[in-house]
Amino acid sequence: MKIDFVSDVACPWCAVGLNSLERALQRIGAELPVELHFQPFELNPQMAPEGEDAAEHLKAKYGMNDAQLAQNRGVLHERGAAVGFSFGERPRIWNTFDAHRLLHWLGEEGRGGQQLAFKQALFKSYFTAAENPADPAVLLRQVAQLGLDEARARVVLESDEYAGAVRQRQAFYQAQGIHSVPAVIVNGRHLIQGGQPVEAFEQALRQIAAQQV
């Protein structure tokens, strides 16, 4: 089974959804071999390098007041904790394009599990530690901590390598009707939308697997 996980590093429900999906796959176990691929989606493709204040950005984008924002964050933190993800305070929202370029690099050149490990590291860096995913030093430190090829990652970051490929992938999924994330696409044709609970992912994946037999 091939799973394309379309998401953005700056999407909190994507962090919840990935942890939920991983738990669902653990429940299903080895009976369902899975290839997991991460595909790019930018919530804020025009975000400036210096970023924006998170609260002000979210209130303006979604028309929320302070009380609504606090309530939404409470729900998000609760859902994250339920699947083992810890949200900290996130004072700013930054551009995520270079993070997507490195994820694409690992999808093309990395070995099994490396792209997933880096994706999880990006989520924790951004949502738990409030680090800037547009900062090359932050990205290279994560690469080094995971034992990945730091020299190769530096070459990617210091060039525009994979920029065209990332934009092409983004355009492809938008053309397929993906306008919100996370979007989990199974075998190229089954869509599971949103940061679903573990049970929902498990049930959907079992049903799809049964149809393959």
Image (cartoon, helix red, strand yellow):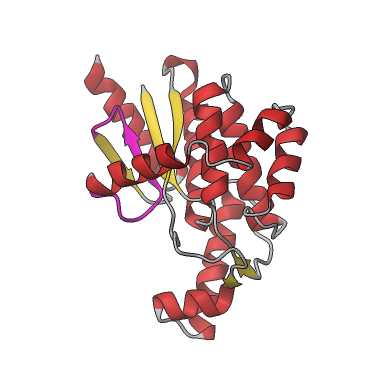
Residue extending furthest toward the front? 159
Quadrant of the snapshot with the N terminus: top left
Residue 16: where, in percent of width, then height?
52, 50
Quadrant of the snapshot with the C terminus: top left
Residue pictured at 44% horizontal, 47% vertical: 7
Residue pictured at 59% horizontal, 63% vertical: 49
Magenta stretch: give its range: 177-189
**Taking 37 as reference, is 53 left or right?**
right
Residue pictured at 72% horizontal, 49% vertical: 138
Residue placed most toward the observer, 201 or 182: 182
Quadrant of residue 202 within the rendered picture: top left
* Residue 189 sits above or below residue 6 on the image: above
Residue 94: where, in percent of width, then height?
58, 62
Secondary structure mainly formed by the magenta segment: loop
Residue placed most toward the observer, 16 or 26: 16
Residue pictured at 63% horizontal, 53% vertical: 133
Total numbered badges shown on the rendered structure = 0
* Residue 164 sits above or below residue 8 on the image: above
Q: Is residue 145 magenta?
A: no
Residue placed most toward the observer, 120 or 20: 120
Residue 147: where, in percent of width, then height?
74, 27
Quadrant of residue 103 within the rendered picture: top right
Residue 79: where, in percent of width, then height?
53, 56
